[in-house]
Amino acid sequence: MSIDKERTGKPSPYPMGEGCQGQTGQPSQFAHRSGGDSGDGMRGREARVTQETCLRGENASTSGTTSEKKKAVSARAGVRVPHSSLEAPESGVERRRGSCAEESKAERERGDGPQGIATPTVPETATGVRKLQRTLYRQAKSKPKWKAWSLYADVCRREVLEAALEQVIANGGAPGIDGQRVESLKERKEGNELRERWLAELQTQLRDKTYRPSPVRRVYIPKANGKVRPLGIPTVRDRVAQTAVVLLLLPVFEADFHENSYAYRPRKRAQQAIDAIKEALLSGRREVVDADLSGYFDTIPHAELMRLVKGRVSDGSILRLIKGWLRAPVVEEDPKGGRRMRANRCGTPQGGVISPMLANLYLDGLDKAVNTGREMQAVMVRYADDFVVLCRKGRGAEVYRRLKLWLERRKLKLNEEKTRVVNFEEDGLEFLGFQLSWRKGRSGRQYPHCEPSAKSAHKLREAVREETARDTLWKQPEEVIQRINQRMRGWAGYFHYGNSTRVLAKLQWYVEARVGRWLWKKHAKIRGRFAPEHTREQLTERHGLYRMPHHAAYGKS
């Protein structure tokens, strides 16, 4: 039983890596430095030595004097000998409750990757980074007032930068203002000296503190309502540096985030948010405030955001990095084809690696104010800047007024066009691509029905229609079907949840009809010639068309 599980009732989202019980025989590369009390009642450097011993799997029966043991531990772990006033335990390092030696096998083998959203994850080979994440999470979880004050040296380590680069490569993305693409750093072989030189240069800049963030390239993505969404694309170098910082800071902030926030977090996904909404509806909260923030990422004030960051981080070097990324100028293309640069005095670039973590941090106070406040008696479920508040009947107007007041005090604004108060039993709710409605089952019992929304299904049909249009007849069938399969797998992987069987079956029929007609047009070269119908078996077995799940899936939690 881990410390966080013992104290909070929930396991850590950062499982231990391999070699947790000292099987590898390799000392840890990371010396965890902390201020204040540790989770086991120890203070400062005493906790550092004990945690290093836990990471290496030191034997509890180590013999020798106290001084000799401290020197041996320090020499192997690469940390300084504690001050003489902080004596180590005379009986050696005990296996305390919550030590990594007592972690269950299931908890150690469980994956640590977030699902859906591109939140930084750690490769399976980077066991040292995973151990450090675990240590930071447990320390922050056990001590609400603890601050990380010496993490910059770990950010500069080669293993952390390697893990960050692998994550940036996995996410892909467009190049920044320097035009460098991640493909140039993708291959990891001896002949690729560019990758090694590039990482070494970045590591040197970070160690010497000569690193400076580059300007952010601004692009605009069209939205369904005709408007555009501004995105800020950092350079590959900035993305790797941001990912390295996020890998170490996310466990610290994760210990404080409210459980009803589901975006950009490890072990959190949209389907869990839908489950929370269902639970609140079944508890009698059927008046819903469907809220949306107006330009949230671009309106976050820097001063208030940095104040929240300093609540958990006191490392000046890391704070300067974050401030530099927030204030990085934005480069836009003018109508004449040139570039213009403007200062960024507000907001965090939507497209930066560090932006999701900071966005969650700024709204964490709202999550706790609504879910734990006695005045509202409501349940708030949030996914990034989209959230719903479920309350008792007749309380919607008051909850809406309190929400608006809280956001105005923090220099945020509700999107009046998208925010509304609805009666769920009459109007239902559309959230995260799902359509929820109140229905009566065959037994007469009412329940919240959940299926993919009509808008989401329409997007998939439009994508399939574009792939099977008349002007694509020149393409090879394998290429077209491969692209369609990618879209279908991604769509079904997200929407195969709840009561989705009927919608999936209709979409499967539509895709088969479109692909079958496209194949008939491509191969019917003689006008009026009879062509055999492409059956489901032919499309699946001969051409490899993906078949969506045809069985019920009520939950993914």
Image: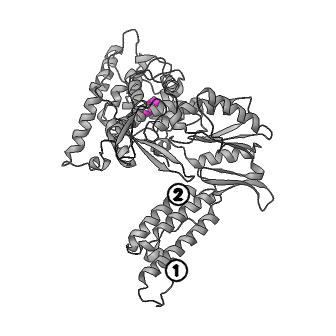
From the top left corner, tell me how far across and down residue 81 is, in percent: 33, 16
From the top left corner, tell me how far across and down residue 516 is, in percent: 50, 77
**Residue drawn at point x = 30 percent, y = 42 percent:** 178
Q: In the rendered image, is residue 96 in sight?
A: no
Q: Is residue 338 above or below residue 98?
A: below
Q: Secondary structure at mark 2?
A: helix
Q: Main secondary structure of the magenta part?
A: helix
Foreground residue, 48 or 498? 498
Q: Secondary structure at mark 1?
A: loop
* Residue located beneath label 1 in the image: 535
**Range of the magenta residues?**
132-137
Q: Amino acid at mark 2?
A: Gly
Q: Amino acid at mark 1?
A: Thr
Residue reaching furthest to the bottom: 529
Does the magenta-highlighted stretch encompass residue 15? no
| Quadrant assignment, res 341 | top left
The answer to whether 170 appears left or right of 304 in the picture is: left
Q: Residues within 10 Å of mark 2 (few under 14, many from 20)?
A: few
Does the magenta-highlighted stretch encompass residue 133? yes
Foreground residue, 525 or 362? 525
From the top left corner, tell me how far across and down residue 492 is, in percent: 54, 60
| Quadrant assignment, res 290 | top right
- Res 493 label: 2
Q: Is residue 529 above or below residue 248?
A: below
Q: Residues within 10 Å of mark 1 (few under 14, many from 20)?
A: few
Q: Earlier in the sequence, mark 2 or mark 1?
A: 2
**Residue drawn at point x = 21 percent, y = 47 percent:** 192
Q: Marks 2 and 1, how far apart in space? A: 25 Å
